[in-house]
Every structure is written in structure tokens, then in C-alpha cells.
Image (spheres, helix red, strand yellow):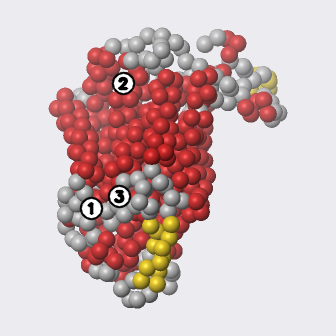
């Protein structure tokens, strides 16, 4: 780091007692200091031209998540997707996140044009743009309403897709390719931030990461209601247009991103040894074992959205409104933990939030039975779904903090990618299990249309009980950071067997989730559902 890259605040002498001490004198607020904080080295000043791609990348990630969420929430249903297809399309959006470790290793070992990060970031955003652009040009994305007469003889309206609308396999492929490019670019952004964070002075630790995540959540909260409104007014075409064009807008900023060209590349064998030594530690495989088991058990009722639409008659605007409120409360949950629960033990946080989540899940049974305590069906459903996201937001930071503490010095990027891969593979396996549960009772679209809800009640109770059962493994989770680090000194502190089991289960989960997702697309109804 060059000396001229670090600007220091002036020192002011004062006499507090018998000894002279020096404190930083706070400079008056100026726009220049706000854009380029003088207490940070130039490499960490995110709003400089050579760094602006970093916050822009995080902002774009949030915006695209906000745009595609309402689209995937409703559009497959408007195209007539089955419950299994709907669940699979939703999981395909995030399935490439399971391969974050692969993206990290790819960029570490095979730089393009001498750059390890910016080249892959440009490639990822271009792939995301191309996938949605292809969907835009080869299919008719319009929707129209038509009147119909229901079984009671009443006239209603329903959304009908045109003949040239995208097929479910085509929409699934576009979603998968978009997710691949999206997560590749996201991993590159995380890697650059991990490198920048090492340059932060002690008094500003975490400022780069906290700033980037604030941009991301801001983009998500703004884009989600915008996407909902645009979908209601204009249909999916304009939303998909934005999804194809916005990734292109960041490419010039990525070109300006400062990165050392032809930087030394560590051998793949060396990186694999670092990962292996990391997962052998009990401080890694035990707490991440809890994270994996807990997330696998968070199975959902994937017929729920179909129930809201077919049985209760929720419109696309109402379904997306639930999603928008959920996005806001997800962020609120993160803030609640950061400012009010940060000193709670991790174990206590999971026990309390899991119990509350079980309560909200069982409240869905009351909605199915028509017991809403005088509230409208929409308001009651809004409370159930949105407050579940609030709880998820509270659980977000404890897991993130734990993963950061597990990263060994010198390989933070690869290690963190591996830990998030564990988390994502568990969630994808959970989604696959959720789809399998559809075959136990009849929760088909036809059954919901004729108000045969016995299967829906049974499925809701079963998934709620399975979610709560995650508490059986909470003893694997350390209470605090100190207890986490102390695991290294306990019996089996370094276990090759533990590391092997950990990696085997992780990659088996990835394979299983992928196979089930593909089968749901190419052979709808293979599990017996509609």
C-alpha cells in the first residue's frame, strides 16, 4: 500500500488526567469526505471510479433479486405450471448458488486475460442478460384475461397465456442460465470484497461489507414492489426486459474495476489441501453439520401458493404483495438481530425463532379451516407468510457471523464460498424433499379447485412438525464465538472421518437436488402429483 493512499485525520492534544493523550479531531462534514472517507485507504473507498463496480454489483444483485422474485412467484402459475414444476422453477433460480465454490476455484485457477475476478464478473452478467434476452425474443410474453363460468354458475375472470407463450421447460432453462450468470457475478463481488476487507484499518473493520449489504438490501426492497406493480399493469414482458438490460449496464463499471493483472495463481492442489484441513476441524464440521441438518428440515408446503390462487382466488397483485412485504420484513429481521439480539447466544436465537416459526406455520391450518378471527383471508395469509420471513431475517446474521469465524487466514474467499455452498445445498435438498411430500396426499390443482382441502391440512401439519424437529440438533450449535473456537481443543478436534462425511453429504445433496429438479421438468407428474 502506498503511503499517499492513506489519509490520516489530524491529531489534537488534550490533557484528561496526569498524562497527555491524543485523540482524532473530527472534521466537519463535507461531500468529499462522505464519498471518500479519509479514515479508509483508497482501495476501500467504494465510490471511487476504480472501485464503483463493487457497490454497483451488490446494488444490482439486490435489484435483480427484487425483479425476478415476483416474476417467478406468479408467472409459472399463469402459464399453468404444476406444483412440482412451480417448486422446481423456484429452486432453479438459486440452484447455481450451490456451485459457488466451483465458481471461486474457477476464477482462482483460470484467469481470463490475466484477471481472476473482473473477467468472470463480466462473463456472469453477460450470461444473465443473454438468457433473459433470448426468452424475450423467442416467445410471446403477453397475458390477457378471459371470463369463465365456475361450478357454482358464477362468472369470474382468469389469466390466459397466448399460444406462443414460453413453455415450462424453456422458462426453466432461462431461469437456470440466469441464475448461473447471476451467482457467478455475485461470487466475484464477494471475493473482491473479501480482499478489500483485509485492507481496512482496525477502527473501521466491517465497513466495506456492511456498506455493500446495505446497497443490496436497498435494491431488493425498491425493486420488489416495482416489479409487482409493473407485472400487474404490463405483464411479465417489461420485467423480463429489465432483467435482460440491467446486467449490461454494469459492464463499463466492471471494466474500470482495479485489479492486479497476471497475479500469482496458487495451485489447485494447494487450495484443495486448505479446504480439506478446514473441514477436518471439529469447529467446522460440527456447527455446519447443524446448519445443514436444520436447513434440510425446513421443508415447505409447495402447494401453498396454488391454494392461495385456486382456492382463495388471490390475484397476481395479492401474491406479489405478500412477497414484497416479506422482503421488507426480511431486512427488518436482520436489523432487529444486529441492534437488539447481537449479544444473545446463537443457540437461544435458533430456539426462540424456530418456536415462533412453528407457531406461524400452524396458523396456516386455521386459514384453511376458515378461522381468521375476523380478518380477511389476504391479511391473515400476509401475516403468516411475511412474519415467517421476519424470523428468517433474524436467523441470517448468526449463521453469517459463525461462517466468518470459521474462515482460516489467507483463504477467506474459498472457505466462505464452501460454507455458503453447504447452506445452499441443504436448502435445495429441502426444496426437493418438499416436492416429494406432494405425493402423500391429494393437493392437486383439481382437488383445490373443488375445495377438497383435507390433503392440504395434513400436508401443512406435517411440514410444520418437520420444521420444528430441527431443534433436536441445536446441541451441535455452539452458544458463542468462544465456544466455537474451543471445539478445536475437544475430542476429535481434527477428524478426517468427520471431514469426509461432511463433504460426502454436501456433494450428494447437490447431486440429488439436481436430479430431482431435472426430472420435474422433463417428466412432470413423475411423483404422482398433478
Residue 246, numbered label = none
- The tag earlier along the polypeptide, 3 or 2, is 3
Compare residues 172 and 271 and report the one nearer the observer.
172
CA distance for labels 3 and 2? 32 Å
381 vs 71: above or below: below
CA distance for labels 1 and 3? 22 Å
Measured as percent of width and height from the top left, residue 338 is found at 54, 48
Compare residues 344 and 234 and report the one nearer the observer.
234
Residue positioned most to the left: 497
Label 3: element kind: helix
Label 1: element kind: helix
Q: Quadrant of residue 471?
A: bottom left
Q: Look at 26% across and 47% down and name the residue there.
A: 518
Mark count: 3
443 vs 286: above or below: below
Residue 86, numbered label = 3
Quadrant placement of the C terminus: bottom left
Q: Look at 59% across and 23% down and name the residue there.
A: 255
Mark toward the viewer: 3 or 2? 3
Q: Look at 67% across and 25% down and name the residue there.
A: 49
Measured as percent of width and height from the top left, residue 509 is found at 24, 43
Q: Look at 43% across and 56% down and name the residue there.
A: 165
Disc 2: CA contacts within 10 A as few (<14), some (14-19) or many (>=20): some
Quadrant placement of the N terminus: top right
Measured as percent of width and height from the top left, residue 112 is found at 45, 18
Q: Is residue 109 left or right of residue 141?
A: left
Identify residue for label 2.
Answer: 105
Identify residue for label 1.
Answer: 466
68 vs 190: above or below: below
CA distance for labels 1 and 2? 35 Å
Mark toward the viewer: 1 or 3? 3
- The tag earlier along the polypeptide, 1 or 3, is 3
Amino acid at each position: 500500500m502506498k503511503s499517499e493512499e492513506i489519509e490520516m485525520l489530524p491529531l489534537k492534544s488534550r490533557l484528561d488526567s496526569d498524562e497527555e493523550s491524543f485523540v482524532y479531531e473530527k472534521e466537519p462534514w463535507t461531500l468529499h469526505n462522505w464519498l471518500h472517507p479519509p479514515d479508509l485507504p483508497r482501495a476501500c473507498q467504494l465510490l471511487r471510479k476504480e472501485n464503483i463496480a463493487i457497490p454497483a454489483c451488490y446494488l444490482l444483485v439486490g435489484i435483480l433479486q427484487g425483479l425476478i422474485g415476483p416474476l417467478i412467484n406468479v408467472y409459472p402459475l399463469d402459464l399453468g405450471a404444476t406444483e412440482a414444476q412451480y417448486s422446481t422453477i423456484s429452486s432453479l433460480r438459486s440452484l447455481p448458488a450451490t456451485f459457488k465454490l466451483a465458481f471461486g476455484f474457477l476464477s482462482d485457477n483460470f484467469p481470463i486475460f490475466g484477471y481472476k475476478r473482473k473477467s468472470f464478473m463480466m462473463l456472469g452478467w453477460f450470461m444473465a442478460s443473454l438468457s433473459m434476452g433470448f426468452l424475450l425474443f423467442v416467445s410471446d410474453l403477453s397475458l390477457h384475461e378471459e371470463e369463465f363460468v365456475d361450478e357454482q354458475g358464477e362468472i369470474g375472470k382468469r389469466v390466459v397465456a397466448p399460444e406462443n407463450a414460453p413453455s415450462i421447460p424453456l422458462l426453466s432453462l432461462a431461469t437456470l442460465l440466469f441464475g448461473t450468470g447471476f451467482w457467478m457475478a455475485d461470487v466475484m463481488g464477494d471475493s473482491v470484497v473479501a480482499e478489500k476487507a483485509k485492507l481496512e484499518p482496525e477502527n473501521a473493520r466491517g465497513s466495506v461489507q456492511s456498506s455493500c449489504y446495505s446497497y443490496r438490501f436497498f435494491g431488493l426492497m425498491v425493486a420488489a414492489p416495482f416489479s409487482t406493480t409493473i407485472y400487474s399493469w404490463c405483464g411479465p414482458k417489461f420485467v423480463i426486459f429489465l432483467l435482460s438490460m440491467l446486467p449490461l449496464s454494469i459492464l463499463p463499471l466492471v471494466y474500470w474495476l482495479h485489479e492486479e493483472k497476471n497475479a500469482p495463481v496458487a495451485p489447485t492442489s494447494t487450495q484443495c489441501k486448505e479446504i480439506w484441513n478446514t473441514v477436518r476441524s471439529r469447529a467446522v464440521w460440527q456447527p455446519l453439520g447443524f446448519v445443514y441438518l436444520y436447513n434440510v428440515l425446513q421443508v415447505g408446503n409447495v402447494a401453498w401458493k396454488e391454494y392461495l390462487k385456486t382456492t382463495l382466488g388471490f390475484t397476481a397483485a395479492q401474491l406479489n404483495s405478500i412477497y414484497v412485504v416479506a422482503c421488507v420484513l426480511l431486512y427488518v429481521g436482520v436489523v432487529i438481530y444486529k441492534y437488539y439480539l447481537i449479544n444473545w447466544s446463537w443457540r437461544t436465537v435458533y430456539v426462540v425463532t424456530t418456536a415462533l416459526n412453528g407457531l406461524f406455520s400452524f396458523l396456516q391450518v386455521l386459514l384453511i379451516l376458515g378461522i381468521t378471527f375476523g380478518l380477511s383471508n389476504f391479511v391473515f395469509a400476509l401475516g403468516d407468510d411475511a412474519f415467517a420471513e421476519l424470523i428468517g431475517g433474524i436467523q441470517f446474521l448468526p449463521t453469517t457471523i459463525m461462517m466468518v469465524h470459521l474462515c482460516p487466514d489467507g483463504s477467506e474467499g474459498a472457505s466462505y464460498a464452501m460454507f455458503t455452498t453447504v447452506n445452499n445445498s441443504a436448502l435445495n435438498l429441502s426444496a426437493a424433499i418438499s416436492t416429494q411430500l406432494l405425493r402423500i396426499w391429494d393437493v392437486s390443482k383439481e382437488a383445490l379447485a373443488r375445495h377438497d382441502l383435507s390433503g392440504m391440512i395434513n400436508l401443512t401439519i406435517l411440514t410444520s412438525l418437520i420444521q420444528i424437529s430441527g431443534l433436536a440438533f441445536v446441541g451441535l450449535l455452539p452458544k458463542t464465538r468462544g465456544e466455537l473456537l474451543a471445539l478445536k481443543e475437544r475430542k476429535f478436534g481434527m477428524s478426517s472421518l468427520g471431514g469426509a462425511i461432511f463433504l460426502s453429504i454436501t456433494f450428494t445433496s447437490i447431486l440429488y437436488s439436481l436430479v430431482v429438479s431435472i426430472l420435474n421438468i422433463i417428466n412432470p407428474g413423475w411423483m404422482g402429483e398433478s
